[in-house]
Amino acid sequence: QGTRDHPPALVLLRDRLLDTVAACFKRHGAAAIDTPVMELRETLVGKYGEGAKLIYELQNQGGELLALRYDLTVPFARYLAMNKITNMKRYHIAKVYRRDNPATSRGRYREFYQCDFDIAGQFDPMIPDAECVRIVHEILSDLQLGDFLIKVNHRQILNGVLAICGIPESKFIATCSSVDKLDKMPWKEVRNEMIREKGLSPEAADHIGKYVQLHGGLDLVEQLLQDPKLSQNKLAKEGLGDMKLLFEYLTLFGITGKISFDLSLARGLDYYTGVIFEAVLVQQENDHMEESVSIGSVAGGGRYDGLVGMFDPKGRKVPCVGVSIGIERIFSILEQRVKASGEKIRTTETEVLVATPHKHLVAARLKLISELWDAGIKAEMLYKKDPKLLKQLQYCEDTGIPLAAIVGEQELADGVVKLRDVARREEVRI
Amino acid sequence: QGTRDHPPALVLLRDRLLDTVAACFKRHGAAAIDTPVMELRETLVGKYGEGAKLIYELQNQGGELLALRYDLTVPFARYLAMNKITNMKRYHIAKVYRRDNPATSRGRYREFYQCDFDIAGQFDPMIPDAECVRIVHEILSDLQLGDFLIKVNHRQILNGVLAICGIPESKFIATCSSVDKLDKMPWKEVRNEMIREKGLSPEAADHIGKYVQLHGGLDLVEQLLQDPKLSQNKLAKEGLGDMKLLFEYLTLFGITGKISFDLSLARGLDYYTGVIFEAVLVQQENDHMEESVSIGSVAGGGRYDGLVGMFDPKGRKVPCVGVSIGIERIFSILEQRVKASGEKIRTTETEVLVATPHKHLVAARLKLISELWDAGIKAEMLYKKDPKLLKQLQYCEDTGIPLAAIVGEQELADGVVKLRDVARREEVRI
């Protein structure tokens, strides 16, 4: 349930997509690593908030207690700590596992690819963070998926807002998870949830509502820096300072047109500590509609300065920031596009079919194909002793093989091969 | 335990290896498929003989009972049956999982790659089988691993031998598992095991011994076809007929020099029904030694005509033959070779570092690198506001970046960039 086989046409399409993503990661100087699909259970504990219940555990068959990885970020942090690496730019493209309710038509599976790029190390503020946002921008542009929007926010700003609204720290996470739903439900419903399910007072909820419904650009950052209450909060002030610098760098990168500072963006994972961001595809469903419709998140990431330290025996921290491209959703869009276009994808690369026009020539075919393979030429033959020529040419047409190399008694006697261009139905003796 | 992280240099080396294998599979016209890492437990039951106890099971967290795949052959058979495919040439390169005792120095892990090529369909005898053997020959030649030997045998010949030696069918599998050890221990010990552990009579064991110690080429096939007892056994006669045809085709492929018909080859998996084969690397440890020393199996495969039918509700059979390349052992050899050579592998592809010679120029760097990325050029910069030029050039030398694009106040004023060849220490203004 929630997994699927990939037949050749889908593998090909998926590999094209992964290649585009990997090309961008390499363009930014990242090196690839790989980690096992299973981690010690204790490695995954306490990193994913409400996601914890979705972790696949392996049966205890004696020995270590294991679980399937839930993302690629925690294994990366574990890898850095285990190998005492304090400085690394890496990418990792691999499958992760979540016991979620599958919604396969929207690309939500229990086994799915993640494409992660992360920068670990102590650096000057916001330079690596800005590069991660730039990478999201590049990949979504390269993939030509249509219009998109990258929402950015900062955990410290969010915490500052909650603090000045009088929310106790013990309710931060629960409140954030309500705030995070603002992209899917109207403020009124989110407010109700805060009051009824999270136990906030109507006044506190309304106070929060004034902030988290704000979105804008550098102007909004400036405006909040002037906000009498928020600017008094240390956390929020630092966060707003980061955000100002981030916008400065994103302006130099020339990509602020698609960036929105959105105070409702919270992101669910426990480990984020600074800038967070999320990209959504924006579909212009109808020119007459005033608001564009979001069809869901396709990339996300942020800064997590505390995670590596959780795996170091001495708690030494390695600041990190990274981005994860959610290719399954993108893949399901591309899949539908290919289906709609009726494009036939060739799933093999065979250049030539070795064929014979009459019986008792299997030896000639085996000898010729052997020579072709030796020469590095992609060649096939039918696995029949005496196939009909028509069947052999039909196979070329069905599978898109452009050439047939035909050897009959006459060709053998003359020491030649008849080379046939399948589409043009033209032959030459060579 | 028994798994490992792959740092960038190893990922690169591994990908080179996998690319070589995939190139061969594509040269033979195979298409790629992918299947989930987990299968229903019931799919794996009863397919692996003694291997069954090594299957990783997932915890029952509600829902389906799952296990990690043990190989790629059973998932392929399940895929064919589920999709009612009766004809396919596919390859699959992916990780599989076995709770074995790890021996990491010899490349035996609990998580490891397999590279499988299989031909499914009803065809004329031995043509696909010969191609699988040819593929092993091509890959081991392409990888330049030194001398190797491909042992071939036939399940029906083995069963025929046991039958004429008076072994009851109930003891076939147990006896075969003793026979299979002949490559690792002398006949005397194998004989002892047969008598003491498997309950064979000394006479029966000796009778078996006369056959399973034989190895040779087409001559041995001819000799056994004349054997008065064996040639009377229907199974053995069919098997020897197959073997004769196989040798005919392998001769046309020009590869019999490295093929040995070896009656001790049994292979452990339950699902084989016909030709079986296994490749070993042969190390010429010492010119003075008479016998060459085998350093273990690096590829294996065979025919399994009954497996797909086990997954079809009506039991419809799809004959299959395939080969699996055990790249972890090959990888551990290559790894040692690279280590011994001291070759330094570059793990990133960055073409140019964007650098500045003095302070307050982070904006200039961000603007220039942005242009380079837009143009598809692989570019990095240090994540410092004001890095020293020496540090920046040092980074190029450490990571093998060939060029530095330097912008200072003068260059900005003149509208140029100073391009430095890092190795030659030469600069041009462009």
Image (cartoon, coloured by chain):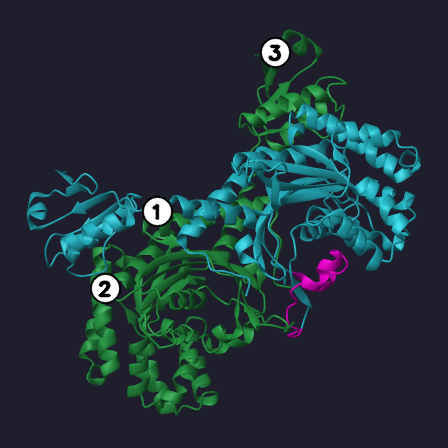
Chain colours: A green, B cyan
Instruction: Please report contact status of discs 2 and 3: CB closer than 8 Å, yes or no.
Output: no
Q: Label 1: few (<14), some or many (≥20) within 10 Å?
A: some
How far is disc 3 from disc 1 in space, using C-alphas? 47 Å
Separation (CA) of disc 1 from disc 2: 34 Å
- The answer to the question of whether label 3 and label 1 lie on touching residues, with beta carbons closer than 8 A, is no
Q: Which residue is identified by label 3?
A: A416
Q: Residues within 10 Å of mark 3 (few under 14, many from 20)?
A: some
Instruction: Tell which of B164 and A318 is nearer to you.
Output: B164
Is residue B40 found inside the magenta-colored segment of the image? yes
A258 sits left or right of A390 in the view: left
Viewer-side residue, B206 vs A178: B206
Label 2 SS: helix
Q: Is residue A321 above or below residue B282?
A: below
From the top left corner, tell me how far across and down residue A411 is, in percent.
66, 11
Q: Residue at x 53, y 73 (%)?
A: A41
| Residue shown at 74% from the left, 32% from the top | B216
Q: Secondary structure at mark 1?
A: loop
Q: Residue at x 23, y 56 (%)?
A: B382
Q: Kindly report which numbered mark, 2 or 3, lies closer to the viewer in this rendering.
A: 3
Q: Earlier in the sequence, mark 2 or mark 3?
A: 2
Eye-nearest disc, 1 or 2 = 1
- Kind of residue indicated by mark 3: Val
Circle 1 residue? B346
Q: CA distance from mark 2 to mark 3?
A: 69 Å
Query: Circle 3 sits in a helix, a strand or a loop, which is it?
Result: loop
Question: Do we see residue A277 in this rendering?
Answer: no
Q: What residue range appears in magenta? A: B39-62
Q: Amino acid at mark 2?
A: Phe
Q: Nearer the viewer, residue B336 or B348?
A: B336
Give the labeled residue for mark 2. Answer: A247
Report whether mark 3 lies on the same chain as mark 1: no
